[in-house]
Amino acid sequence: MNLKELSDSLGLSQTTVSRALNGYPEVAEATRIRVAQAAAAANYRPNARARGLATGRSMAVGHVIPISTHHEMVNPIFSDFIAGASEVYLDRGYDMVISAVPDEREEEAYRALLSKGSVDGVIVHAPRSLDPRIALLREIGLPFVVHGRSTNEPGPYNWVDVNNRSAFLRATEFLMDLGHRRIGLINGLLAMDFAARRHQGYVEALHSRGIAADETLIHTSEMTEAQGYAAAKQMLALPAPPTAFLGASIISAFGIRRAIEDSGLVLGRDVSVITFDDDLSYLRDASDVPTFTATRSSVREAGRICADRLMSIIADPAQPPVEHLLEAALTVGRSTGPAPRGTTQQMG
Amino acid sequence: MNLKELSDSLGLSQTTVSRALNGYPEVAEATRIRVAQAAAAANYRPNARARGLATGRSMAVGHVIPISTHHEMVNPIFSDFIAGASEVYLDRGYDMVISAVPDEREEEAYRALLSKGSVDGVIVHAPRSLDPRIALLREIGLPFVVHGRSTNEPGPYNWVDVNNRSAFLRATEFLMDLGHRRIGLINGLLAMDFAARRHQGYVEALHSRGIAADETLIHTSEMTEAQGYAAAKQMLALPAPPTAFLGASIISAFGIRRAIEDSGLVLGRDVSVITFDDDLSYLRDASDVPTFTATRSSVREAGRICADRLMSIIADPAQPPVEHLLEAALTVGRSTGPAPRGTTQQMG
DNA sequence: CGGTAAATTCAAAGCGCTTTGAATATCCTA
DNA sequence: TAGGATATTCAAAGCGCTTTGAATTTACCG
């Protein structure tokens, strides 16, 4: 069923039917109702391509998720992020086009999205501290919102980010308040902007109490369970092991916990752990008292906010960029406690 | 830059340029080269909507991922599945359109996808044993491939599934061979087809050795860490606790492990665990000797296969349906061992 | 009741591409 | 070198929609 058939069957012109369906004012109320009913009965929906061709808009947004060629990793947070964004698109009638693209084909992917005209805007995922994508998108003039930030990017642009620096700064302070002095940082890849900021927060907090960051207590890698385990295990075997850990994701934290228990220690008593928690639905830590003390920020909510922002930019591209900084909640669970006596003196 | 501008600049007709670009034979080789170079220089790509309108194909496939309204859960396996599918689409020039849709709006979503003409086919995710989507898609004539199966669906259709029954049958037998007789099953929601089949395999294996399934040792829920923990904890507190567990996902297994250790028991010695492992990139259990004994099947690979199949159906819709059954690998890790002496006699 | 303003409706153009059917250029053979 | 075959190129139609500008109806007022 297409417009022509529908309008023919109603004895009306395509113009009138189109207008009736799209809510234009210059159509008689009686006609509008008649058209709406016929359309519903025929299960008619305008062809998206034809409409897009006529209007110049595709009613779709792109999400380009980078897949690191070396690691072939796909962060599970995308599932939740996308779910959040979807909620917004669904109500606005937008489609979501996803391209999972190897690092080196990213630029190509964005250019293709633009010149093929398949999307009206994009969400940029997983920005690095130094990220050419933002300049590229500015240059080609495709509306975009970044989930996260890119530290080295000059000039304003639309982003939605958690205050990663502050989150880890507060977490580190929280641990130091409990008497911990040797705190292991099990971080994500430093090239990622969020990881760099967390590192920064951690170091700042230590410095503010006159503690020098110890390189042997800082680990950087993909945030897998296995890496979390290996890194924590290794640090716990040091002559002066950490009494607490900061983990970059709940998945890392699982690994850290395993390493602790594996070493015959008790989580929350012998060794404390604070993790960043993206509040993923399948990894939710939401008992009355959560397992992990965490800096928590829902990535699904971030998805909603990003999508909403992008919709707004697409509707009015002239508006000034908005920088949306979310504060993570520091929620206390069972994985933290006072530093064991004696160990606080071990540091240099 | 559009076709008209490009062909004008070359002094050729749109017809010739279009044909040159699309590899039609009736164009002089010299012309083709000249056109190709000009197109590359101008960064020209045909407008997807216009092309779609002219050809009747959208060069996009849809993935409708259901979000259960009650749980608001998004399975992290989607990230990996999508990454696998993407690899295929990327090379074939297809876009991937994702709709994350609440249960009750699913039918609407599929109909919209069809009548708006935004996709040439769809992948059906997370089928239930009784799933109206397959009949719906057949009815509306949209090419589809199901990731999984729907037991109660009569007649053939294209699906790609792991042999869930066999996987859990073998896992259960493996545990019984080690002397285990009380085996806890911590499963996904039974309405899901994969969960029902795993349940079936488990029960069959028990029966084959004359053991009756014990309802108190069977738990069914979303496959979260928290649920895995709670269920295992509860079973371990039974008068006659299980000596082994079967987990439905690596995430559940994390919870099961925590419950075991929490109860002062040792994984692989006091209590054995076998988990289904979708081989998610961030949850990969790939040390020399994996932590968990597992029935493993890469969901990313499944994504590739589904996508490939769908491409093929779209190209030739007349071909007979293909049913693709993957066998999970039973890989032995450190989470299984002989049943502790004495406990094997506890059962009734 | 005539005439103008307002309310409705319509025909046709155009979005950027593919493809049909026709036109033109080139080649080869007798 | 004529004449048909073959190789290239082209103009124009059409995909299904929105939207412009014009046409037609209806409403209103003196």
Image: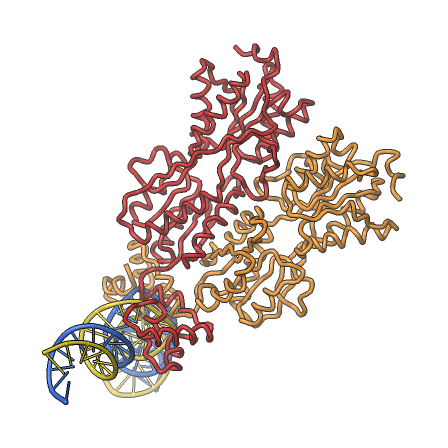
Chain colours: A red, B orange, C blue, D yellow
Task: Give the answer, above or below, for where A9 lies relative to B37.
Answer: below
Query: In the image, is A289 to the left or to the right of D11?
Result: right
- Front-most of residues A290 and A229: A290
Q: Whole-percent x and y of residue B72?
A: 56, 49
Residue at the (43%, 74%) spot, across then down? A37
Tell me: B224 left or right of B260. Answer: left
Give the camera-side residue of B228 and A123: B228
Give percent across and percent down for residue D22.
18, 78
Decide: is A113 above or below A266: below
For the image, the number of numbered tags is 0
Q: Which residue is at the front of the view, A289 or B322?
A: A289
Quadrant holding the N terminus of chain A: bottom left
Taking the spot 60% from the left edge, 13% from the top edge, the residue there is A343
Q: Is residue C25 left or right of residue A238?
A: left
Q: Is A206 situated above or below B65?
A: above
Residue A123 visible: yes
Q: Is residue A42 above or below residue A341?
A: below
Residue drawn at the location 47% of the way across and 25% of the way down: A170
Q: Position of residue A180 (x, y in %)?
A: 55, 17
- Does residue B19 appear in this view? no
The x, y position of residue D1, in whole percent, is 23, 84
